[in-house]
């Protein structure tokens, strides 16, 4: 008669070969023979997804830049989406606003640092000043322009805090077309 706790002879032999008694071998759960892992592990770059506050300004006039809020999200494969809204009220007169939306790619060689590259569409208000010959005064008119930017960047992550720097380069029409460049500094919280 077989006991329900009895171990087959093959298990006793394997246990003896690896230095285990039959009782120790019986206590260990059987290993899964499935090829896939049922738990998905989060990649290092996806841990950099965050909501952020930022400041961005041109190289020549950084003190007359834009402050704002934004969001960037990274998939496990490194694909990135981002959106930000910025304003310069209180910094420049008159205040202006800017938004950016785009996609990109990020790579985290280690858990606390990442390099990114993104392409953004940008929209921005600006003020156009013109001398009015009839009145002899300078007229100002609020306008809206836009452009496209390429932004390489770096991220550092300390626990849940993400510090970011982007170097934005591209073309923009803000009263006249031309080369656009600025630096964006951000401080984010991961989600």
Image (tube, helix red, strand yellow):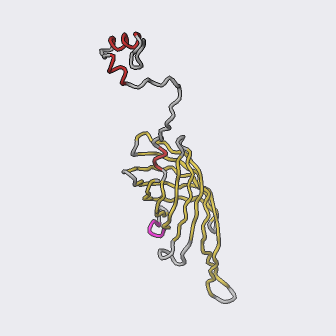
- Relative image position of residue 16 (x, y in whole percent): 32, 12
Residue at screen point 68% across, 85% down: 133
> Looking at the picture, does residue 5 appear above or below residue 124?
above
Spot occupied by residue 127 in the image (x, y as percentages of width and height): 60, 75
Where 149 falls versus 129 (above or below)? above
Between 36 and 58, the residue placed more toward the observer is: 36
Q: Give the range drawn in magenta.
A: 61-65
The mark tally for this picture is 0
In the picture, the quarter occupied by the N terminus is top left
The stretch drawn in magenta includes residue 64: yes
Left or right, 11 with respect to 32, comes to left
Q: Residue furthest right?
A: 134
Q: Percent from the top left, x then y, of residue 111? A: 40, 43
Q: Does the magenta stretch include residue 35?
A: no
Residue 85 position in % (x across, y down): 55, 65
Q: In this view, does 124 lie above or below 10?
A: below
Q: What is the residue that sits farthest to the bottom in this orientation?
A: 135
Q: Is the magenta stretch mostly helix, strand or loop?
A: helix
Seen from the viewer's position, the closer of residues 51 and 8 is 8
Q: Is residue 151 above or below residue 20?
A: below
Q: Which quadrant of the view contains residue 125?
A: bottom right
Identify the residue at image location x=47%, y=70%.
64
């Amino acid at each position: 008669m077989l006991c329900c706790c009895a171990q087959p002879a093959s298990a006793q032999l394997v246990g003896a070969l690896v230095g285990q008694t039959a009782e120790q071998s019986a206590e260990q759960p059987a290993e899964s023979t499935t090829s896939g892992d049922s738990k998905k592990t989060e990649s290092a770059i996806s841990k950099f997804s965050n909501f952020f506050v930022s400041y961005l300004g041109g190289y020549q006039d950084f003190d007359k830049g834009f402050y704002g809020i934004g969001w960037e999200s990274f998939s496990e494969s490194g694909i990135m989406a981002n959106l930000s809204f910025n304003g310069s009220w209180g910094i420049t007169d008159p205040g202006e606003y800017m938004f950016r939306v785009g996609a990109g790619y990020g790579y985290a060689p280690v858990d606390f640092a990442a390099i990114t590259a993104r392409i953004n569409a940008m929209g921005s208000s600006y003020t156009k000043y013109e001398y009015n010959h009839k009145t002899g005064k300078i007229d100002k008119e609020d306008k809206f322009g836009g452009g496209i930017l390429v932004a390489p960047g770096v991220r550092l992550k300390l626990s849940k805090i993400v510090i970011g720097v982007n170097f934005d380069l591209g073309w923009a029409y803000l009263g006249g077309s031309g080369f656009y460049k600025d630096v964006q500094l951000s401080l984010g919280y991961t989600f």
